[in-house]
Image: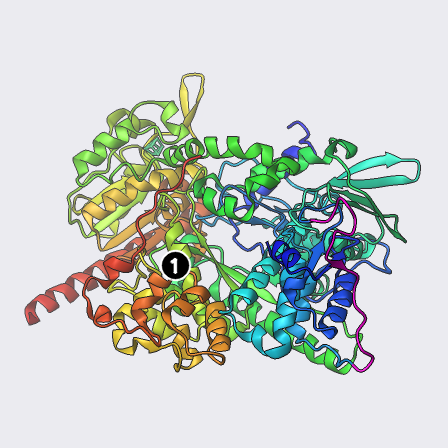
Amino acid sequence: MVAMQNVSLGVHHVVHMPQPDDFAFWREHARTLIQCDVPPDRVSWVEPGGTGDLFAHGGNAHGEKRLPVPDKDAPPVRVSKRFMRLAKNAILHSDTSRFAQLYLLLWKLQSNPRMMEDKADPDVRKVEEWDKSVRRDSHKMHAFVRFREVESDEGKHYVAWFEPDHHIVRANAGFFKRRFANMKWSILTPRGCIHWDGEVMRESGPAQRSDAPSDDPTEDLWKSYYASTFNPARLKVGAMMSEMPKKYWKNMPEAELIPDLIASAQAREAGMVSAGEREERLRPQNLAEVSDAISACRDCPIAECGPRAVMGEGAIGSPLMIIGEQPGDQEDLSGKPFVGPAGQLLDECLEAAKIDRSAAYVTNAVKHFKYVLRGKRRIHQSPTAKETDTCRWWLEAERAIVQPRIILALGASAARGLLGKTVSISQARGAPIPLEDGSELWVTAHPAYLLRLEGEARKEQGALFAHDLSAVRARMSALTMQSSYHSQIA
Amino acid sequence: MSQQTLRQKLEILADAAKYDASCASSGTSKKNSLGGKGIGSTEGMGICHAYAPDGRCISLLKVLLTNHCIFDCHYCINRKSSNVRRARFTPQEVADLTINFYKRNYIEGLFLSSGIIKSSNHTMELLVEAARILREEYDFRGYIHLKTIPEADPGLIHQAGLYADRVSINVELPTTSGLSRLAPDKDAVQIEGALAKTKSRIIEAKDERKRFKHAPRFAPAGQSTQMIVGADDASDADIVGKASNLYGNFGLRRVYYSAFSPIPDASAVLPLKRPPLMREHRLYQSDWLMRFYGYAPGEVAQATDTHGNLPLDIDPKLAWALKFRGQFPVDVNRAAKEQLLRVPGLGTTAVGRILAARRHRTLRLDDVAKLTQSIAKVRPFLVALDWRPSTLTDRADLRALLAPKQEQLELF
Ligand code: SF4
């Protein structure tokens, strides 16, 4: 449009740019024109083979004048650093009006040297926006160029095909050179190509996609990585698209996975959630519900052993909760906790320590009996940490309902069922471990462990066990006294 | 067990590392491969070489050396008691994979972390070995981020810092009680001790470089840490307080937040629900307020509700402004930079532009509109030459007016 008006004015200068990104050339000519006081509407800038070249056919159209020569004493042209920086970059933009627009800005700057600081000025803004999109394009080139390895006579050569929006290829050669200094590489683009052989940078004309290699075996690994590092539970497609718009996808091997990854994400996430399926299921609110729920529970492999789950026994509000590992053969048959040999030993020891079992709530960390069949015999197997953790859900439910003030864990699995970690009995025993709800946990050995010992060891461990029980007993009395004391005051 | 292929191992060990949020490759010293034997450069800004559909930047090859672990942290997919498939790379395999990816311009470098195998020292030795092969044998000059293990020998951690651009130690959870409940094998005191030690090493190395040009660099991109959000019941105020302590005490470059994701084979003590992404986002925003906008941690806490949590429907800056309406409107033509930075909707760039532009003209609302993203959002808090928001800041429904419409997660 500018050019049209100029034609009608009759005095006109045309500058033919030799390259679309030749800042030095533009700068030299712009300087001359300013020095000769040629206003912006008397110049047109023509890109090589580009559009906007009103005079392309017919050579010098009427009215076109050769570049003037400035007076020897013409004052030097001055610009701010900021203009230089912006102009150098903005000139790479693909907008064909960029040379003229920059010249306009340069012209205005001569009378208003601080104009660049005025961010609200539309001419400044336009150049700033070009600068921004060129910077973005360069940044995406650094990021999204994908080399493919080609074996040649002179060793390995890495070749990429990239489609930039602007004339940025030459300007970014340095980045790739500094990064891949000792590699032979080429970047092919429809706007021209660059080639580095480890010593010299070469340029060549526009290329086509088919000039570049079509694959590289390492891409499979890269795609696997891309798929595996994606977290399906946090789908944020919008964020991805704004940083990696679709136009780039066709030249990025990993992008072909995107539609499938997105499509399967919701199913995968749902799978993860339902694999645990704890959230959907509300924690049971009373003991009957717990009892029903554990009978139906198939959350861990132990349930395969047999359908019966053994529920705890005792009253809500019992001050003491005693937790064993898991039901054994006899418990499984009777449906009651601690009725087998270990239970009998426990009863004796409790009695000796003057703890009334009927005033305690007795249960197990794991609700199903885990065993292997040997002939007709069912041989006890310890639950794994994972199984104990899974069953903890039910134990926590019982605990929340019964609300004991003291919990006595018999053995490592029982302790794990409460703490979520494995503690050593010898270190944990003898002192209370405070729990979050204000109750306290005492840890001791499992009576079944005592049953397996003989002689001295049995005696020694039996004494420790008895000692632990009486410590619990003492603690219970102390707590009862405390609370009756408090109720007296209140 | 049949031999796993490299690809199978990569799948397992990348999958296991994906819950770590830190991926940055920025802020390190400049280097390039000119005059060297190998490849690689770092030029200040990090580069995101791809984005995954979770919106996260893929900048580094982020993998574990192994996902075998002797620890049993509940929030972690690699905990001892989990049933996940296990795999293990050799340091050489990790180094080769990094170089092969780097040569194709897939990545900026390596972020290597690991489950604990055998002992902390043994594990740390393997991590350092992978970095050593990259730096010494391949003359690799790209980015390396090593996760260090707090219990490991100080000499090993020192070695890690000499090879790596950044080192990090995860504090994991914002509260000590959360840590002892969910990461029973970890120890908050030890973690913080290790952060402190790394901080003083970084400072020492900087001092030495001032005196001797060739003194070795130690983690030039500094150290960072990560906290998991939503696995325990810490409030946003707790988290922000913790983060600001961490920044203050240990000179951290970044505190990352990772919304707790339901993990396959989750431990029964954890919430199984969608990760609190919006909450994570709000925490990052509050992080920015503290780092770039001059808000004190206490002021961020002022923006929280009675439970100490930031509102999810509006950003923390707007939440603060709505609570302290007396501070607004501010005059775009006269207000100090600090005041302008408090205006919801004005970012640091926009404030910079306003400050520059107002030297040339007295700004009208139209001018401000050209310099900001959304004039509708900032208008209620600003006075310009031709604009004064009469009673808007007094309106009770201001929040409703400004809160963005609820957005659904987009389907594809
Ligand atoms: S042992 Fe516990 S978790 Fe496993 S199936 Fe039985 S009740 Fe469920």
Query: From this viewpoint, which residue is outermost toward the right?
Result: A153
Indicate how the structure is coloured in the image: rainbow
Name which residue lies at 16% across and 47% down.
A359
Q: Position of residue A478 (x, y in %)?
A: 20, 64
Which residue is labeled 1 in the image?
Answer: B282
Name which residue lies at 33% across and 65% down.
B318
Residue A237 relative to residue A151: left or right: left
Name which residue lies at 22% across and 55% down.
A405
Ligand 1, seen in the image, is in the quarter at top left
Q: Compare residues A296 and A267 and report the one nearer the observer.
A: A267
Q: Quadrant of residue A178?
A: bottom right
Which is the main secondary structure of the residues drawn in magenta?
Answer: loop
**In the rendered image, the vertical position of residue B205 relative to residue B103, given as above or below:** below
Q: Compare residues B71 and A429 and report the one nearer the observer.
A: B71
Give the residues in magenta: A53-73
Q: Position of residue A349 (x, y in %)?
A: 28, 46
Is residue B132 at least partly visible in the picture? no
Residue A317 relative to residue A375: left or right: left
Whether residue A61 is in magenta: the answer is yes
Q: Quadrant of residue A307?
A: top left
